[in-house]
Amino acid sequence: MSPRVVIAEDLYLLRDGLVHLLQAHDFEVVAAVESGPELLRALLDLRPDVAVVDVRLPPTFTDEGLQAALTARRAVPGLPVLVLSQHVEQLYARELLADGSGAIGYLLKDRVFNAEQFVDAVRRVAAGGTAMDPEVIAKLLASTARHEPLGALTPREREVLELMAEGRSNAAISQRLFLSESAVGKHTAGIFTKLDLAPSDDDNRRVLAVLTYLNAARG
């Protein structure tokens, strides 16, 4: 069954382009809206598998998209949301991450370089994972250095965790950092231990580790 998507984007050409792009990759676009109130209604009525949401929507072009996503996730815990924006709204981005349920992404429009990158992020979020742009991570983590348990991580472990937050596999992390996969595995195990994540499914612990890392910015 094709994943069901709601798109919220006020610019017609971009909204129409997203519709055609996702349909071409076997998504079912169940709604494409242009305002915050329309987005909230669509999310609550249609309960999509994933929502692609711009931050600034009518009527005020401030934070309607994120506010609608937050409201919908409070009503439907874990509702997958991929934010696609020109801006990093740190407060609301951290609030989206704060419930610990995963299924969150945040991409910057001018840093999406090809269709495969975008579609992969949508699929990852729909599956309950995370897909975070490195610039978004850098801004969200700017104030985390003082907070435990992050202070217990080594610089290399922080690098590995940041790449995990982007949704990268151990194989991809090993290529990026020029490490063996076994070394990445050891760093990952160290991260799980220092963040006090009990043994469980590794995919679940990866999501929990990323959320712990990002949520520390709330302090």
Image (cartoon, grey):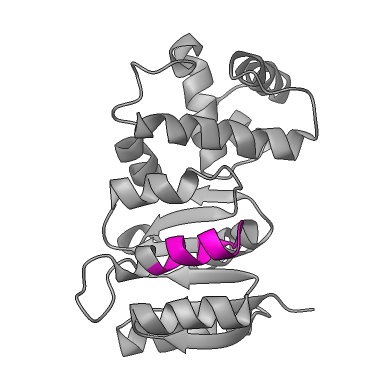
Residue at image location 19% in from the left, 76% down from the top: 60
Q: Can you give x and y, in whole percent of width and height, for residue 91 in the image?
A: 30, 46
Q: Is residue 18 left or right of residue 171?
A: left
Residue 218, position as x, y percentages in the image:
36, 34
**Which one is in front, 27 or 172?**
27
Residue range highlighted in magenta: 68-81
- Front-lying residue, 11 or 169: 11
Q: Is residue 9 above or below residue 75?
A: below
Whether residue 121 sits left or right of residue 10 in the image: it is right
In the rendered image, which quarter is residue 194 located in? top right
Confirm whether residue 142 shows in the render.
yes
**Percent of width and height locating residue 34:** 35, 85
* Residue for point 80% across, 78% down: 1
Number of callouts: 0
Answer whether residue 176 is visible to the viewer in this image: no
Image spot of residue 123 (x, y percent): 64, 63
Residue 73 lies in the magenta-colored region: yes
